[in-house]
Image (spheres, rainbow, N blue to C red):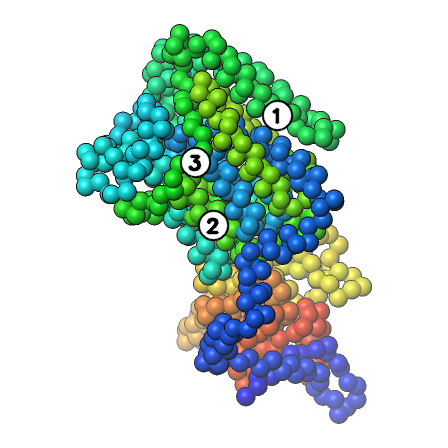
Amino acid sequence: MAEFSNIRSVTEMPEGDDAKRSFHHRMFLEPQEKKRSMKALVVKQAKKTCSCTPAKVKDYVFSFFPVLQWLPKYKLREYLLGDIMSGVIVGVLLVPQSIAYSLLAGQEPIYGLYTSFFASIIYFIFGTSRHISVGIFGVLCLMVGQVVDREVQRAGYDLEPAALSVLTDTAAYVNTTISPVNQTSQKLHCDKSCYAIKVGATMTFIAGIYQVAMGFFQVGFVSVYLSDSLLSGFVTGASFTILTSQAKYLLGLDIPRSSGIGSLIVTWINIFRNIHKTNICDLITSCLCFLVLIPTKELNEHFKSRLKAPIPVELVVIVAATLASHFGKLREAYGSSVAGHIPTGFLPPRPPDWNLIPNVALDAIPIAIIGFAITVSLSEMFAKKHGYSVKANQEMYAIGFCNIIPSFFHCFTTSAALAKTLVKESTGCRTQMSGMVTSLVILLVLLVIAPLFYSLQKCVLAVITIVNLRGALRKFKDLPKMWHLSRVDTVIWLVTMAASALISTEIGLLVGVCFSMLCVIFRTQRPEAPLLGWVAESETYESLSAYKNLQTKPGIMVFRFEAPLYYINKECFRSTLYKQTGVNPGWVKAAKKKAAKRMLREKEVDSGDNQTSVSMDFLSEPLGFHTIVIDCCAIQFLDTAGIRTLKEVCKDYREIDVQVLLAQCNPSVRSSLIRGEFFKEGEDHLLFHSVHQAVDFALGAQEHSGTSASK
């Protein structure tokens, strides 16, 4: 049975003696019929999902492996040069960063190279974005490193850097095919660095499973709760934690890495307590690296439009520092901490440690969410810039497999990174082939060059990590502009940044999400609710508090509530309406009752006609208006509390001879009002398509009632 919405249109006042009342055209809107048969929907979806045709299989395979779509169409002459140039440059930049960020993740340098190598290849196969660079990301490395340190300490290993080389690990990997019975036997089979990558790989595997599951169930909407201001504040706050974790390497201090709540403050306390143990050689090396890296990075940014490719200053610094450390024998003479032996080739694959999954499953949730949120946002941003489309769910599959598959090859968590993506785009990248070239550059390092970095000081790697935080720390310069644009977003940024830095990265992310959601709730709880005035010679009504020279119609108040009307703000709606109109129906009714009682008492004591006339005058005192028009254009939805509030407001005003009209209700609100039995037979509450129509109706009705009263 179809429902018809009875909506008033423009008032017409017919002339003549026969027209003793006003007639109004009515619009009858018949809603579209909605099929609500759940059984039919389930059967239809099941048929669609379970049907299997060659064309459907082909489409599924091509959508799951995007490389099969774009690779046959690859324009060799047009694309190859740009892809090779961008791939080589990103690979050259990625090598030192992979080694440096390994320290941040609590791993040996070789594992950072493994991670970048496998991530580039897998995204080449599964990714839909032509420009993003997938690999090591500082914030995720920090989050992985915190979990690794916790689990290493829980397993009973020393928190000092492992003295054994990764070559020893190779033999340990063979022995660890049998799970250790207890911590003592575990130490015999696997040293600290071996156990650290076991924890990192297991957590990476779980994070990848989460990301693939998000893609399968199409829950990418979760990322909408991570606004730009929230993500920016989180990255900046995490940057302070990254800087703090690397500060000990700058000074050559041998102190345990703090983790958990307040780790930033605890770390700085430990640094100042041990400041007298500073290694002068590491300190001087750090200062020299800063003096070279920062100016060169600034020049790269300042002249990026003129440079065909950025100066690979990080690689130059690493090569120079390695040569200086090797020939100057800085480790033997001054006790500088060095990277140690980095083996060539690949270690045999090994599955994640299933026994560790309960320990790291919860920690992998924020890592998975941050990873896919950054990857999807970057891929969509660059796709829009260059005029092509990406599939958000396929991007979640891609980043998930970039974590699942490498976790079997001693890798840790990856995602897209903005800095390397910008370099990749600016150096001529055209397709995903650039990522394959990057992986070949890293492969060359893994097979030939890696052992040459034995004497590289860890303080140099720490400097590279810190210098790459400049972009996140520069966000403080944008605060005045952000404050001018949106104070709410600025407060969200500050709260998320402070919580991520001072409490912990995971809790900071949770605090940011909760605080941003509370901000949305508070903004709907106390929304703007102005009175409206008429713009002369038009049918437009705007806020009296925002614009000048607006006119008001005599006896009519127009009120707009700029938020959904639901249980949280229903009292705000009621109190604001009473405040703006200056009339609280409850008080008026109470005053009238009090005056009526006083009049009865005066009659009983025969106190005179004068007093009685005063009371009668009060009972008949006009309110100054006869109609309230509620502009509902900004009310997106109503719940049961909102409908009940509207009913009560209309009833209360009707009892003091004030009619309430609703205008510009959207279909959702109209449907809610009909289902809530807002319109009862015999009542004059009508819906209007515009405020102007409602005002015309009220004026016509008042003129008609005045004419009838005079006759």
Total count of labels? 3
- Residue 76 location in percent, x, y? 71, 46
Kindly identify the residue that appears in the image at 49 percent across and 31 percent down.
Answer: 447
Residue pushed farthest bottom?
18
Distance of label 1 from label 2 (alpha carbons) = 30 Å
The amino acid type of the residue labelled 2 equals Phe
Residues packed near mark 2 inside 10 Å, few (<14), some (14 to 19) or many (20 plus): many
Q: Secondary structure at mark 1?
A: loop
421 or 330: nearer the eye? 330
Label 3, on which residue? 346
Kindly tell me whether residue 105 is visible in this rendering.
yes
Kindly identify the residue that appears in the image at 30 percent across and 38 percent down.
Answer: 174
Kindly identify the residue that appears in the image at 19 percent across and 39 percent down.
Answer: 182
25 or 322: nearer the eye? 322
Q: Which mark is residue 312?
A: 1
User: Which callout, 3 or 1, points to the residue nearer the camera?
Assistant: 3
Label 2, on which residue? 401
Left or right: 396 in relation to 157: right
Distance of label 3 from label 2 (alpha carbons) = 20 Å
- Residue 294 location in percent, x, y? 59, 21
376 or 529: nearer the eye? 376
User: Image height check: is 56 above or below 275?
Assistant: below
Kindly identify the residue that appears in the image at 30 percent across and 27 percent down.
Answer: 159
